[in-house]
Amino acid sequence: MEKVHIIDLQFKQIPNSIATFLVETDAGPILIETGPESTFETLKKGIKSLGYEVEDIQHVFLSHIHFDHAGAAWRFANHGAQIYLHPKGAPHLSNPDKLWNSAKMIYGEQMEDLWGEMKAIPPSQLISMNDGEKVTVGSTTLTAWFTPGHAVHHLAWQLGSIVFTGDVAGVKIDNGPVTPPCPPPDINIENWKASIDRILELNPTMLYLTHYGTVTEIASHFEELKLMLDDWAVWMKGYYEKQVDPQEVVPLFISYTQSQLEKQGLSKETVEKYEKANPSWMSVAGLYRYWKIKEKAAKTQQ
Ligand SMILES: [Zn+2]
């Protein structure tokens, strides 16, 4: 069995918030997720500490193209790596201006500080995967599974009985509860639950979460995640229907989720990690959009 190493990117100096995974194959190391470009130096150090150089990584597997997962992919492409991803993600990485500028409208001045730099990847190095398609490196085989719900361009990567779940298995830090990251624009609760069922059908024995680390109690993990998805979506629906300004909802949602975490006995420090890894304001925006799209769809059906 291949050895999987977790590299902690120490995003914003916070341990256990964003991971990348280095898998040793008999044809050299491969990487699953790259993290943001802002933590590339930390990633480089992590790769070195395992006895490798950045140039040794010739295969990079992305769960999706959000900056915290794929922001540093171009750095590896610069050294000739092939980048494997969902077909809907590929155009954004070959021409990242649109992705960058729309994020800049949200993050403003903080953009570079949070995410670093983003450069285009030549289309010839972006390998679009079909659902169920396999990639073989040496004697290691990874299978791509379409898993929308968090993002339409989301893949889970299966390696034997292990699944690298990106964001579709939620966020779980320091033995806290599992919570769903719900940023705009693609959140779809029904699709997300269907994606969970797809992963369950693979009968995995271990999940690797980008935020953060391994999960072995898989059935209860996903059950908890489904409950949380419904809980957050229903909570948000109430405010959406009353047309409360999302800006006003953010502090309410922060205190709602924090009390959920505190009820589980989490320390203040861990509660803060959750907010950093899965910001409440993003989930307010994402779930508002989810309800808006649903409302529109219902109207056109009438
Ligand atoms: Zn993420």
Image: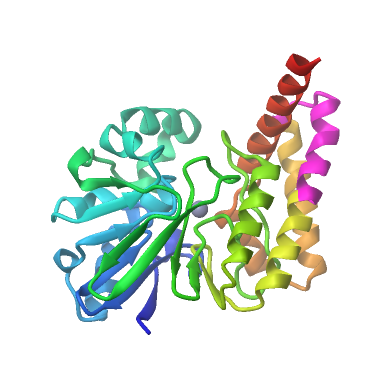
Secondary structure character of the magenta stretch overall: helix
Image coordinates for residue 223, horizontal then vertical, percent: 75, 64
* 43 up-or-down from 289: above or below: below
User: In the depicted view, which residue is nearer to us: 281 or 92?
Assistant: 92
Above or below: residue 36 compared with residue 46: above
- Residue found at x 69% / y 64%: 222
Residue 176 visible? The answer is no
The one of 4 and 246 positioned closer to us in this rendering:
4
Determine the residue positioned at 70% across, 71% down. 219
* Image-based side of 88 in relation to 233, left or right: left
Residue 106 to residue 121: above or below: above
Question: Which percent across, then down, holds residue 122?
Answer: 18, 40
Looking at the figure, which quarter contains the C terminus? top right
Image coords of residue 197 (percent x, y): 66, 58
Front position in the image: 122 or 157: 157
* Residues drawn in magenta: 230-247
Is 271 within the magenta? no
